[in-house]
Image: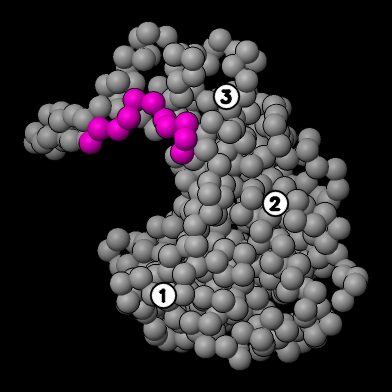
Amino acid sequence: MEHMNKLNTIELFAGVGGFRVGLEKANPELFKVVWGNQWEPSKKAQDAFDCYASNFDEGIHSNEDITTVTDEAFKNLDAQIVVGGFPCQDYSVARSLSGEKGIQGKKGVLFWEIKRIVEATAPRYVLLENVDRLLKSPASQRGRDFAVMLATFRDLGYTVEWRVINAAEYGQAQRRRRVFIFATRNDTGFAKELESYESDDVLFDKGFFAPVFPVKREVIKNRRLHGVLPDDIVEISDTFSASFHNSGFMKDGEFFSIHTEPVFEKAVPLADILEPEETVDEKYYLSEAAVEKFKFLRGAKKIERTSAAGHKYIYSEGGMSEIDDLDKPGRTMLTSEGTTNRSSHVVEVNGRRRFLTPVECERLNGFPDNWTNTMSDRMRYFCMGNALVVGLIERMGQRIEQIEKKHTVEVPNQEKFFLEQP
């Protein structure tokens, strides 16, 4: 197919726009973000939103509590894709008091807003990102939260595939591990194509992730999981427990999950993302006192502490290198980056130690230089600690483009989909 219509895209919990940057890098002619929402509750300053609005011209930039946006507003967007990274929270559910209105999700859990928007728009595709512990949470009932999500997509009429991806294992500059979740509507050509494959073929070769994030065709340590989700989502919330692995596939409530190993690509080393030293401001260099503080923070230690209840215990911590290896990709960046704490990157160049600059942190995530220069350094570090690795989304955008080229003509219109829903 030589021509494809633009895919109207809704970007939720947008931050500084990582999904949009990645999709537009993949194909700016295909992906059209028509509505991007970023709202930080309980804060007067909306730094991430201001950054988003300053970097993008087209589409509606929403700085409002998403729970207040009406279903009708979403329907009017005619969206084919919904994307977003969302908080990892407690996804326990319960029946409504009347028992007649289905289930209720725990208040404040933003996944239920994703569900509401998918119900309102019936997008062709949904692409989400979260921390990988989502697959095993909560600790007291492993896998429950993710199973609730899978059942939600099942009930909405979607096939789901997931993959835990470490960005550095696929040629990126940061060792950042996240779970990505791709859902495709059951009546699309791609969903129908997947029905013709065995589950292993989906996960190793034919599904959404494998063509752009290849894995070895073997199940690590024979870690397999196969099951069927209970029809009742409240039953899942109350009793379900399973150990989902890093790759998986769900169709009509039947799920398959295996432990895969990536076909490694050479990562970008820290040395390659550093700014020229002559351009680095003196404020990023460590004082002698800070150098000594980092020696302590990163050293092995055993410290006696007293709990709130009054009993004493020994807190122990293993040692790590005082400086980050410039020949390796960066470690996972946290929101506390650039402060004197154990997790901040410290590099040594020409015998002097310093923090990474905000531009270098942008490069760790694959953003253009000075993408976040609308805000203070502290907030630039914070936003990059929250951001995703753009290069991964770029590949996923390329994969969606492949799927569209193959299946666009087979996709029924959304109005028909709405009419056929029970």
Image-based side of 396 in relation to 246, left or right? right
Lower position in the chain sequence, tag 2 or tag 1: 2
From the viewer's side, name the closer residue of 100 and 53: 53
Tag 1: amino acid: Glu
From the viewer's side, name the closer residue of 394 and 266: 266
Q: Secondary structure at mark 1?
A: loop
**Residue beneath disc 3:** 357
Query: Residue 350: horizontal and vertical position, in percent?
Result: 49, 15
Tag 2: amino acid: Gly
Query: Residue 238: horizontal and vertical position, in percent?
Result: 34, 75
Q: Are marks 3 and 2 in contact (CB under 8 Å)?
A: no
From the viewer's side, name the closer residue of 178 and 379: 178
Lower position in the chain sequence, tag 3 or tag 1: 1
Q: Main SS of the magenta segment?
A: loop
Q: Secondary structure at mark 2?
A: helix
**Residue beneath disc 2:** 22
Q: Secondary structure at mark 3?
A: loop
